[in-house]
Amino acid sequence: MSAPGAGQDVAPTTHALVELRVLEGPNLYFPRAAVKLTLDIGALATAPVDVALVLAERIGLEGARPGEPESGFRQRFALRAVARLVRAVAQESGTSSLAVRVRPTNDAHQVVVAYPWAHRERARAMGRAVASVLDTLVPGDDGVSTDRLSAAVSVAAETVATSEPGDAPTTLEPRVPVVAVTGTNGKTTTSRMVAHIGREWGKVVGWSNTDGVYVDGVLVEPGDYSGPSGAGRVLAHEEVELAVTETARGGILLKGIGLTRNDVSVVTNVSADHLGLHGIDTLDQLAEVKAVVPRITAPEGWAVLNADDPRVLSMRWVVKSQVWVFSRDPDSPAVREVLADGGRATTVIDGWLCVLEPDADPDPLLELVDVPMTLAGLSHYNVENALAAASAALAVGIPREVVVAGLRSFLPDAEHNPGRMNCFTVPVSDGEVTVVMDLAHNEAGLEAMFEILHGVRPEGARVLLGMGVVGDRSEELIEKIGEIAARDADVVAIGHKEKYFRGRTPEELEGLMRAGAERVGVTAVPAYPTEVGVLSALVGQALPGEVVGLMCHADREGVYEWIAEAGGVPDTAETLAAKVRAARAG
């Protein structure tokens, strides 16, 4: 069992309670701290109709029609019954009203129940007490009486009423402006750009992400701080004047968001990643998780949404704030609709990054070729990131001229954006090769990487790719990575990420990636134990002018060191632009 105060709290002595998780702040179910229960309702799903009716009578579900065991009607009855049971226990323990959310899962015998909490230990006691009532329904036992169930509910309520209240939620009320960034791809780059622009403004910026907590550009606490603890760590530094928080799916689901609100939210996109984990199996469900971030944006603030992603755009209907969209298409219907509703938009017109307001001429900020992160306009994904960052920076109140200066000075290098589309020139026999390093952790990310690899590849030159995956992705996604890599690269090899096997063996990961590659006719894909190993092997066989890509996640610093020892240097914005122009000329 987890230590007191931790999120997860499994009670193995209670059959019906699969998991009890305390969410410390806004979450998928409520805009405030909540408890999430995963309950085994197998006994209720299979119980005879008479037994189901006994439960319905005790908890006040008058006129219930529970349906036959294991039917769709029974499943819907079970959802209603569990919600009513939670409310009955709460009311009889002294809580006059309690909001409850109940959801099915991909297991017909499990449901998720959530309710807000004000006192930690009493909220936990409530979860265990509800499960204890369900434990009175024993599979195959058709002799459950009203008295027996009534006594179970009464005991459960008494247990809750006499439990220690415990601590209040630790959700923080921000004291400085907060920009919260979420999305499947681009959130790290976007949040780094916003933080950089904030520093250009002269503010002390605190920023949290999967790498750690940064204050004024200095890494003060390494580690994955994309969850609620990251926001808390940022705001704990009294000198911070602007907070930029990267908010990942896992943190929202497992702990909740650590802040009561944000002033500006950004949702970059929603694409396939992490599906099949923590009950999130579809893109629509993933979008619902990401929507928690704009949902808690202050009414006077702005939700910055990707108008080119339908799932993100639809979030405008669930926010209380003003809406600011970004799109590469100035004639997008979504842009017109948002402007008509009094919102704002950031887009590209005649190669210029522009801001649109209702009944006003476009405000051209700067040309895309002057935004180094777009790689001379080559990377449409980074064009979107730049649009999102400019929108967020303006929305939080940063002056226009500062935003322009920040977009000009944010570079795709190890200093400004480590691990994301970092480009190098590395010497080889009789010439040089280009090395592009990126996280590229899912299908969309890898396709974005290939956009760069092919965009700087001279005519007739090859693209060589070192691919690798994290073990907790689905088999389908891992195979798809292998398929895309083999389809779009001339030479492909595997470089393992030992720190991120996450329950899989290297042989298993190799098999899945090779299976994907075989779909497009590529066989005998070699494998190396590390990212550095596969990079060294690919650079060793690359010819002058060719391009080597590396999906780097586990050993970024080791890769930087290897490139430096090989005589490689980071590409400047001017060097990259020259490579793009040369590739286009060919």
Image (spheres, helix red, strand yellow):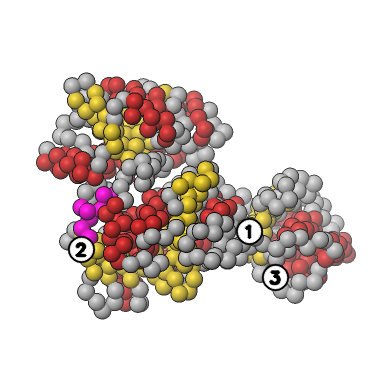
Placement of the C terminus among the 4 image quadrants: top left
- Between the residue at mark 3 and the residue at mark 1, the CA separation in whole angstroms equals 17 Å
Q: Amino acid at mark 2?
A: Ile
Name the element at disc 3: loop
Q: Is residue 20 left or right of residue 425?
A: right
Residue 129's x, y, as percent?
79, 58
Give the residue at mark 2.
Answer: 349
Give the residue at mark 3.
Answer: 98
Residue pictured at 21% horizontal, 28% vertical: 432
Give, as a single range, the part of the protein colored magenta: 366-373
Which numbered dot is residue 24?
1
**Which tag, 2 or 3, sits closer to the chain's start?**
3
Q: Are the residues at dot 1 and dot 2 in contact (C-beta closer than 8 Å)?
A: no
Q: Are the residues at dot 2 and dot 3 in contact (C-beta closer than 8 Å)?
A: no
Residue pictured at 45% horizontal, 24% vertical: 529
Q: Amino acid at mark 3?
A: Leu
Dot in front, 2 or 3:
2
Name the element at disc 2: strand
Q: Main secondary structure of the magenta part?
A: helix
